[in-house]
Each structure stands twice: as structure tokens, then as C-alpha cells.
Image (cartoon, rainbow, N blue to C red):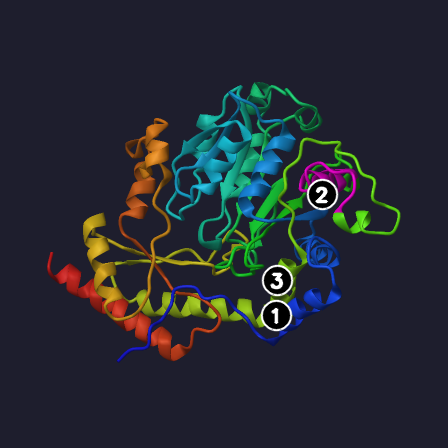
């Protein structure tokens, strides 16, 4: 009898427990010193000018787009192949998601971005699917073109200061990646429970803005915006005689609490071993499946970029969606849990009702119809990896024999 192998359990060890207990015993569990410590860890790892903790990737992206001044009629270019939060953030901010097709690495097509830019375009959001960074060098090349710059119409103070479209990285999957030579203006990470680094729920907005923006002023503004636009955070208000405050911005309530940040801080103490294990699992799968002529492997490195090993997105050549689903059903009988990342957004009811049609995104559909995501997390043993590989390959071989 095979022991059930889950898809993505959280990594909890003594370091995590001790950090959480430290927050609980401190008497301060909402946004405070542990959040600041986590923000600085992101700055240090990637050289960001500043980072701000939020309660989710989605709220962080909405906050960035509102700060940019997105309004009705403004367009934000995104890939059709991503989780729905990428488009929902644009809708919540009041803008229109302009979906474009993707490339074989699951990431947004630079060529399609350029064709989609209009005078209404205010931002581009690249998405690092599975933890493999999108082509930000290519996106910067587009934004540097005079023909593209001439199309840009600045309609807010931030847009005027920027003088071009804002480049945002949806890096929900990417903590642990090497991004290559250029970072986006703003990188938004997720700290959701299934991510490589987690705070149970949470996110990080990291700033890499040009010199026309004062870093400290922008950080302080974003911090206020996470707290309903309040002039003082809760820690400042709690100090004796410091109760008076003002609401000075049209903000949201989306701050990251210390007790959540503590989980991520605990994981960071073991980060090298956590990340090393994820990459070794990714490579184990690659080495195992490369011997099959039906296996299309996800990218690990390209042009200075390296995957975070968040997902192993195996594709099966020559099969369609219905057979893929049958294969997953067969694998599930063995107690091995697999998944699919993602259903392209134009296939989802909300977006179909908004007029998006999957027929306009043939590459996205061709990737989706034969993709299976395999478990990848640091506590996965080699013995269980062998079981996963054996059961997955057996189910696929049997299915292809029946064709």
C-alpha cells in the first residue's frame, strides 16, 4: 500500500515554530518589526531599493495599479496563461486586462506584447510561471523603442514621473529564482501557503523604480496605502500619548501581520537547504523523464535566468485534454497527487462572459491540454520521488498505448 503523497504541504520546522512563538510572546502580532525584517531580507537578496509587506499577491498588485493611477479605459497587458489573480487585480483597480498569448516556456510572448500596446496601455505584467522568469530583457527592449514611447499618454502624477508604461513582474512563483540582467520596475511576490517561501498568506511589493522616484517617500506612501491611508501605523499609535492620526490617502486594508511574517522568517533560516532540495527534485524529474520521447520538460535555465523550482510542469506530447484528465485520474488511484497549472483564463466563465475567447490564444491552450504538475517540496524523499516517477510514467505509457 502506497502512502499518500500530497502535492504541496507547507515547510514547518523548529525555526518556524520559534519565530512564530517569538511574535506571539512579544505582545505585538500585527504589522511591526518582523515585517520590517522580512522586507529587508527581500531587499538584501535581490538588491531591491525597498520592499513592502502585504496580505496577498493580489492586494499588492491592486495597490500598485491604483498607485499608478489606473482608471476605466486604461489597459494592462498580461498573459492569457496565468492564475486568475493577475487579471482580477487589473479589474479591481478599474482597468482592462489585455490578454496576449505565450511562448513554449509558458511565459508571455514579447512579440505579442509589442503588437498589443496602444495609447491606452499603462502597464505590462510579466508572469514567471512555475518560477521561471519571464523575458524582462525583451520587455525592456520594447519599452525602450521610440515608437512605443511615443504611444504612451501620461494621465497621473506617477505616470508623468515615469514617462512610459510601468513594467511589473508577477513573481508569485519566483522567490528563489535568478532573474537575469534586468528586474522589472516593481516585482510582486506571493507568500501563499504553497509557495517556496510562505507566511501562510501574504505578499511582498518590491521597488526597483528609476531615480525620478524617491525611494523612502515611495515606501512610506505604500506603507500608508496598506493601512487605509492612515498617517500612523498601529505600532506608532500604540505609543503613549500618540493616539491621534489622520487619513491622508485613499488606501486599502492589506497589511502583512508580524505573526505571518514570522513564518517566512523562520523558513529563511533554512533557506539554502530548502531551495537546494527543490532544485534537486526538479533535476531528478528532468533526468528521469528525459528518456521518454513523449516528455516535454519545463525550462530550468535560459539567458542568465534560473527557475525557483516552484513547479515541475511536465507536458505529454501527442495527447489532448480529455486523455490528460484520464491520466490524472489513473495517477490519483495510486495516492500520488498531481495538479494542472493553469486553466488559461479565457476558458474560465468570468472571462468568457467578458468576451475573452480561448481560440485567440492557441499556444496557451496547446500548453494547457497536455500539462501535468508534479509534487515538488523539500520534505519529499527520494523514495517518494521514485514512486511518483514510476506511477506517473506508467499511467502515461498505458494511456498512450491505448491511442
Q: Earlier in the sequence, mark 3 or mark 2?
A: 2
Q: Residues within 10 Å of mark 1 (few under 14, many from 20)?
A: many
Is 393 above or below relative to 46?
below
Q: Is residue 320 visible?
A: no
Residue contact at pointers 3 and 2, CB within 8 angstroms: no
Quadrant where the C terminus sits is: bottom left
Which of 395/247 is in front?
A: 247
In percent of width and height, residue 42 lies at: 66, 55
Secondary structure of residue under mark 3: helix
Instruction: Give the residue at the far left of this rendering.
Output: 402
* Number of residues whose C-alpha sits closer than 10 Å to that of mark 3, classed few (under 14), some (14–19) or many (20 or more): many
Q: State the residue at coordinates (20%, 52%).
A: 319
Q: Is residue 288 magenta?
A: no
Q: Nearer the viewer, residue 39 or 28?
A: 28
Residue beneath label 3, please? 264
**Which circle marks residue 223 in the picture?**
2
How far apart are labels 3 and 2 at the CA level?
Answer: 19 Å
Say above or below: 366 vs 396: above
> Can you see residue 319?
yes
Rendering coords of residue 262 (x, y %) = 65, 63
Q: Name the residue at 63% across, 66% down.
A: 268
In the image, 238: left or right of 308?
Answer: right
Check if mark 2's residue and mark 1's residue have beta carbons within 8 Å: no
Helix, strand or loop status at disc 1 = helix
Q: Range of the magenta residues? A: 217-233
Considering the numbered disc 2 on the image, is that residue within a helix, a strand or a loop? helix
Q: Residue 348 appears at what percent x and percent y?
A: 33, 38
Q: Which residue is mark 1?
A: 16
Quadrant into which the N terminus falls = bottom left
Q: Quadrant of residue 71?
A: top right
Q: CA distance from mark 3 to mark 1?
A: 7 Å
Amino acid at each position: 500500500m502506497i502512502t499518500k503523497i500530497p502535492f504541496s504541504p507547507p515547510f514547518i520546522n523548529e525555526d518556524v515554530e520559534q519565530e512564530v512563538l517569538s511574535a506571539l510572546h512579544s505582545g505585538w502580532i500585527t504589522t511591526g518589526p518582523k515585517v520590517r525584517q522580512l522586507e529587508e531580507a527581500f531587499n538584501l537578496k535581490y538588491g531591491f531599493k525597498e520592499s513592502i509587506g502585504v496580505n496577498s499577491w493580489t492586494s499588492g498588485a491592486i495597490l500598485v495599479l491604483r498607485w499608478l493611477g489606473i482608471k476605466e479605459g486604461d489597459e494592462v497587458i498580461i498573459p492569457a496563461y496565468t492564475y486568475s489573480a493577475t487579471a482580477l487585480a487589473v479589474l479591481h483597480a478599474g482597468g482592462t486586462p489585455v490578454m496576449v498569448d505565450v511562448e513554449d516556456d509558458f511565459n508571455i510572448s514579447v512579440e505579442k506584447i509589442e503588437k498589443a500596446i496602444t495609447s491606452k496601455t499603462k502597464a505590462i505584467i510579466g508572469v514567471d510561471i512555475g518560477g521561471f522568469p519571464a523575458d524582462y530583457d525583451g520587455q525592456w527592449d520594447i519599452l525602450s523603442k521610440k515608437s512605443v514611447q511615443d504611444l504612451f499618454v501620461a494621465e497621473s502624477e506617477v505616470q508623468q514621473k515615469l514617462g512610459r508604461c510601468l513594467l511589473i513582474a508577477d513573481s508569485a512563483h519566483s522567490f528563489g529564482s535568478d532573474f537575469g540582467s534586468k528586474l522589472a520596475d516593481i516585482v510582486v511576490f506571493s507568500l501563499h501557503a504553497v509557495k517556496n517561501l510562505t507566511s501562510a498568506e501574504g505578499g511582498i511589493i518590491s521597488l526597483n523604480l528609476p531615480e525620478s522616484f524617491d525611494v523612502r517617500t515611495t515606501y512610506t506612501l505604500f506603507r500608508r496605502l496598506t493601512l487605509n491611508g492612515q498617517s500612523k501605523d498601529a505600532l506608532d499609535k500604540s505609543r503613549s500619548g500618540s493616539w491621534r492620526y489622520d487619513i491622508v490617502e485613499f488606501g486599502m486594508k492589506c497589511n502583512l501581520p508580524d505573526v505571518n511574517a514570522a513564518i517566512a522568517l523562520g523558513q529563511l533560516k533554512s533557506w539554502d537547504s530548502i531551495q537546494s532540495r527543490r532544485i534537486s527534485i526538479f533535476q531528478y524529474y528532468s533526468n528521469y523523464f528525459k528518456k521518454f520521447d513523449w516528455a516535454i520538460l519545463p525550462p530550468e535555465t535560459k539567458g542568465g535566468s534560473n527557475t525557483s523550482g516552484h513547479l515541475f510542469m511536465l507536458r505529454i506530447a501527442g495527447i489532448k485534454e480529455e486523455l490528460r484528465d484520464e491520466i490524472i485520474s489513473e495517477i490519483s488511484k495510486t495516492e500520488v497527487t498531481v495538479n494542472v497549472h493553469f486553466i488559461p483564463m479565457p476558458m474560465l466563465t468570468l472571462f468568457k462572459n467578458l468576451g475573452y475567447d480561448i481560440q485567440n490564444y492557441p499556444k496557451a491552450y496547446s500548453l494547457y491540454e497536455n500539462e501535468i504538475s508534479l509534487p515538488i517540496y523539500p520534505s519529499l524523499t527520494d523514495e517518494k520521488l521514485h514512486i511518483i516517477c514510476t506511477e506517473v510514467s506508467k499511467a502515461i505509457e498505458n494511456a498512450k498505448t491505448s491511442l
